[in-house]
Each structure stands twice: as C-alpha cells, then as structure tokens.
Image: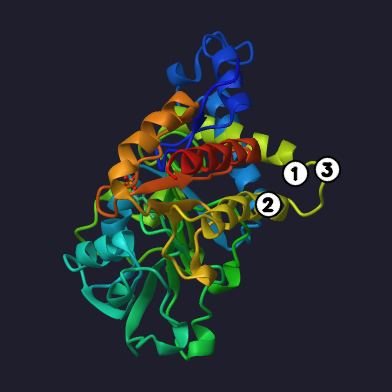
Amino acid sequence: MRRPFNFSAGPAAMPEAVLQQAAAEMLDWQGSGMSVMEMSHRGKAFMSIIETTERDLRELLAVPANFRILFMQGGGLAENAIVPMNLSRGGVVDFVVTGSWSQKSAKEARKYATAKVVASNEADAHTRLPSPAEWQISADAQYVHICSNETINGVEFHELPDLKALGSEAPLVIDFSSHVASRPVDWSRVGLAFGGAQKNLGPAGLTLVVVHEDLLGHALAACPSAFDYKMVADNGSMYNTPPTYAIYMAGLTFQWLKRQTADSASGIAAIEQRNIAKAALLYDFIDGSQLYRNTVATGCRSRMNVPFFLRDESRNEAFLVGAQAAGLLQLKGHKSVGGMRASLYNAMPIEGVQALVNHMSDFEKTQA
Ligand SMILES: *Cc1c(COP(=O)(O)O)cnc(C)c1O
C-alpha cells in the first residue's frame, strides 16, 4: 500500500526512496559498523559524507566557485539575526516586505542594524509582488533582503531582481527556505542565500547558507563565533559539531535529485519543469472551479506553496476530514491566513497533486 500524500509546509515530506535508504543504512552505514548518528564528525566516514553532499549541491544548483556553501544550525529565523550580524556592519539594510517571512526578517534585523522597508505589498494583503523598479533602495544599503518564496502567503519571485540594473551595488540576500532546489538560481544576482532544510532538502536541524566569498569577514564584534560566516567557512562547517544526520539526509536527497535528472542534461531545470507542471495542475483546477479560489496575482503565484480557500468557509473542516480519509495529509492553511495550503515540494509526485485535485472535485460535487 502506498503511503498517504503529505502536503505539509514544513517539516515536509521527503522522497520515499531517501527514507528507505536511510532505514537500510540506519544500523550500519556502508560497512562502518556505525549509524551516521554515531560517527565522529571529523572521522573519515563522515568527512566523505559531507564532502559528497557539498559537491552534489554545488553541481545541482550550479553554485559558482567563488561562493562558499555553509552547513549551519538555527533555521531560517536564526539567519534573520545572523545575516545582519555578518553583513550589516551596523549600518543600513533594506528589506522588501512581501509576506510573513520577510516581515519577520526586517523586524529581527532592527536589533543589529538600521533596517528600512523599501517596498511592501502589505496594502495588497501580500497577494502580489512590488515591482523592483519601484523599490526605494538606500544609497548606503549594506544589502537588500527579499524572501524569494513566501511560504505562508504563496507568492514567489519568478525572476530575482537585478540590483545593479536598478543602480545599486548592494548585494542581494535571499531567503530561499521554501523553494531551494525547486528551480535554478541566478547566482549573478545573489550575494547570499539561506534556507532551512526542512522544506525541500531534508529534515529540520540543518540550515544551508550559500555566500559570496567577498562578504565573509565583516561580522560585528558581538557575533557568536559559531555564527560568524568566516569562521564557519574557514572550518569547513566544522567550527562546532554540525548537524551530521541532517546533512547526511540532505545528501541522500541530493543523490535522489541527481538520479531524477540523470537522463537530462539540464539538471535542476528538469526538476523545475516537473514543479511547473504540478503547480499548473492545481492552479488550473482552482481557477476553473466554483468552490475554490486562490487570491494571489497570477504572475506571482508560488509553485511550492498554494494557499486556497473554500468560498463557504464553514465547510473547511469537512473538506479536511475528507482529505485525510482520502490519504491527503496536512492541508490546513497557516493560522494567519486560514483556509487550506498545499505544499508541492520536490518530494510530492504529480500523482499526489492529481489525487488532491480529484478530492477537491469530488468534494465540490457534494456541495451543490
Ligand atoms: C520555514 C521558513 C523559515 C523559518 O525557518 P525555521 O527553520 O523555522 O527557523 C524562514 N523563512 C521561510 C521562507 C520559511 O519558509
């Protein structure tokens, strides 16, 4: 029997093949006589795991050689403090507020720097993205922060802003927690990207940071050493014990992604095509139905997180009970938005999206 389809926004479903491999290797990783959880992080076995993980990620996301890949802890929320501690130099930092996560980032940065909101879609209830041409970027901004996929509000940047073309030399910081590895990244426009692993890469506990090497070495004096990017980079993410098991699981996920794209020269672009098809299936159904609606402007809709509402909200509970019975898990919307939310990360096959659409259609017929 197949497992239910899990639409959780995070921690989220992982590829079944990855879970199976981890189970098979649980007691004895490749003849070492140890679980990965029991290994010294500095031993040969784990060194080979972390090196392979980094190499596969660099290859999948085409990370240029002058960017460092850091495996950290603390999640996206800790990065909301760690980024300004490392990059702000105590000066001005700009935020584009497009939803709950970028709002949180701006608020946290105020503890360390002068954080300015230079554009916001709050007046549109976070349903469309403010056009970069209208951003009031500060002349002295140390960086400009965006959340490239707003997990709660369901808005996504389908093109990263080109700050140079907007007349700014500031590096772009992206919080790509909830769409990392779902599509290629244009690194020529990025100074630093961060994301928690638990949406699209692996289990909670690992935070990925990809940072241009020019941005290292400017941490505030009060920055904890374990959160100083230069310290982490100089020590190969081993300044302190890294989240070894989560790194291993992310590594298995990268190997799975590579197998998925093995018959295509385009790598992650092939994964992107699948994600486009999955999202289109769901949005097209919602737009064509009388019962369901999504309020995000069509050009800004997230491929990963699809919030939707029943026109009759008194039916929400019945919808969720039916979904659960049909093997469709964790569809309840975030409490700040309400309604439903379907997260369609890489591990969600199109069959799962089809099963959701079938349930939505069946449920609609019972509501006439
Ligand atoms: C989930 C999420 C976070 C928060 O991550 P934590 O690991 O809970 O700190 C931050 N930003 C975005 C875009 C997210 O989706």
**Measured along the vertical axis of the image, is residue 70 above or below residue 66?**
above
Q: State the image coordinates of residue 122 (x, y, percent, origin top left).
A: 28, 73
> Callout 2, which amino acid?
Ile
Residue that mark 1 sits on: 261
User: Which quarter of the picture shows residue 110?
Assistant: bottom left
Residue at (24, 57) in percent of width and height: 223
Return the residue nearer the eye: 278 or 294. Answer: 294
Under tag 1, what secondary structure? loop
Q: Is residue 324 left or right of residue 33?
A: left
Looking at the figure, which quarter contains the N terminus? top right
Quick one: label 3, few (<14), some, or many (20+) residues within 10 Å?
A: few
Residue that mark 3 sits on: 263
Residue positioned most to the front: 368
Q: State the image coordinates of residue 205 (x, y, percent, origin top left).
A: 37, 36
Q: State the image coordinates of residue 155 (x, y, percent, origin top left).
A: 44, 63
Residue that mark 2 sits on: 268
> Callout 1, which amino acid?
Thr
> Callout 3, which amino acid?
Asp
**Measured along the vertical axis of the image, is residue 158 above or below residue 222?**
below
Return the residue nearer the eye: 90 or 163. Answer: 163
Q: State the image coordinates of residue 220 (x, y, percent, origin top left).
A: 25, 64
